[in-house]
Image: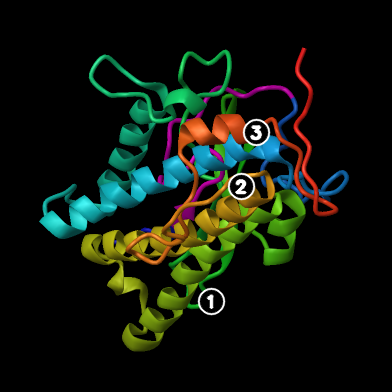
Amino acid sequence: MRFPILAACVLVACLVAAVPVPAASAGQDECPPKKKKPEGPPPDCSKCSALPMLYRELLEQEFLRNLFKKWVTEKYGPGTVELMQRRAKELLDQAMKGTTTVRPLYGVLAPQGTGGSGGGAAPAYGTDLSHKSCGLVEYVRCKKTTGDGKEEVQEVQVPITPAEVRAKLCEPIADYVLAHEGYHQKTCKASWAEHGSDKFLKVDYVAEDDLAAYEVGIGVLRQHIAKLARDCEWSGSTNKRKPDGTMTVPTPDEILKLKDNVRKTTGQLRRKSKP
C-alpha cells in the first residue's frame, strides 16, 4: 500500500494527509496552485510575547509524540497508515478543542476568545516517501471546477525547499519543521536504498518513524523556548535538561508571566508597564 506523505504541522500539528475539505472560498488559487513569493520578511518569534504561541506548538507536538509512543510501545493501534493518521488528527482535534471527556490541551495558555480551543488540526509540511528523492512538500488548498461546473477545494502537496520554508515561518518553527522533516528524509532515503521501492511503508515503520521525528523536532523547539525564556527573565531550573536530554522549559504559568517582559538587548531587562 502506498502512503506517500508524512507531515509535520505548524501551529496546529498533525499527521493526516487526507482530511475533510471545506467548500471553496474566495481568495484560494485555482489548481494546480502557483508558487507565491512571501510578502515581506517571515514572522518574528523573538519577542517575549511569542512564548505562549511557541509553547502551544510544543504541547501539540508532545501530544502527538506521546500518542505514537503509546502505539509503538503497546503495538496495539490503528491497523492501516491512513486510519492511524486519521485517528491522530481526530485525537489532537479533541485535545485542542476540549470535550466533556477530554481536558483542553492548552490549559492557561489557550488563545484568548477561543474558549480553550486553538482551532482544528491541519497538515502544513511533509516528506514525500513515495519517491527515492524523499522531497519536502507543503500542503496547499486550491479550487478546482468539477465536470458539472461546481467548485470544490482540494488539498495538494507542492514541492518546497528549506529556504522557502524559512521565508514563510519564524525561526523556531522553521527549525522545528526542518528538523522533523529532515529526520523523515534521512530514513526515507535509507529505506529506498535498502528496499528499492516504497514497500517499506508499513504501519509499524510509519509509527516508529513519526515517533522518532517528533522527538528530534521537540528537542529543537524546547531549546528555542528555553533560550527565549531566559532572555525574558526566566530564572531557569536547577536541572537544565530533562532525563531525555531536551532542554527544561518554564511551566505554562511561568510563560504567562514572562510574556509581558521585554527581551534582553543590552544586558538589561525592563518589564512592560501595565495600566
Task: Give the percent coordinates (x, y) of residue 32.
Answer: 67, 47
Q: Amino acid at mark 2?
A: Ala
Instruction: Please name the residue that numbered disc 3 is placed on.
Output: 259
Residue type highlighted by circle 3: Lys
Question: Which secondary structure class fits the magenta region best?
Answer: loop
Query: Marks 3 and 2, how far apart in space?
Result: 9 Å
Give the numbered dot on residue 229.
2
Specify the label residue 27 is tagged with.
none
Residue 2 is at least partly visible in this image: no
User: In the rendered image of this protein, does residue 217 appear above or below residue 59?
Assistant: below
Q: Is residue 213 above or below residue 47?
A: below
- Pointers 3 and 1 in contact (CB under 8 A)? no
Precedes in sequence: disc 3 or disc 2: 2
Three-letter code for the amino acid on which mark 1 is drawn:
Ser
Secondary structure under the numbered disc 2 in the rendered image = helix
Residue lying at 78% horizontally and 48% vertically, measured from the top left: 42
Q: Is residue 228 left or right of residue 202?
A: right
Residue 22 percent location from the top left of the image: 52, 24
Query: Which of the labelled discs sits on residue 133, or is there none?
Result: 1
Between marks 3 and 1 in the image, the one whose residue lies nearer the viewer: 3
Q: Which residues are magenta?
A: 6-26
Mark nearer the N terminus (3 vs 1): 1
Left or right, 161 with respect to 186, comes to right
Q: Is residue 23 left or right of residue 60?
A: right
The quarter of the rendered structure image containing the N terminus is bottom left
Numbered disc 3: secondary structure: loop
**CA neighbours of label 2 inside 10 A, class few (<14), some (14 to 19), many (20+):** many
Q: Residue furthest right?
A: 40
Which residue is depicted at the point 71% across and 50% down?
A: 170
Q: CA–CA distance between discs 1 and 2?
A: 38 Å
Residue 163 lies in the magenta stretch: no
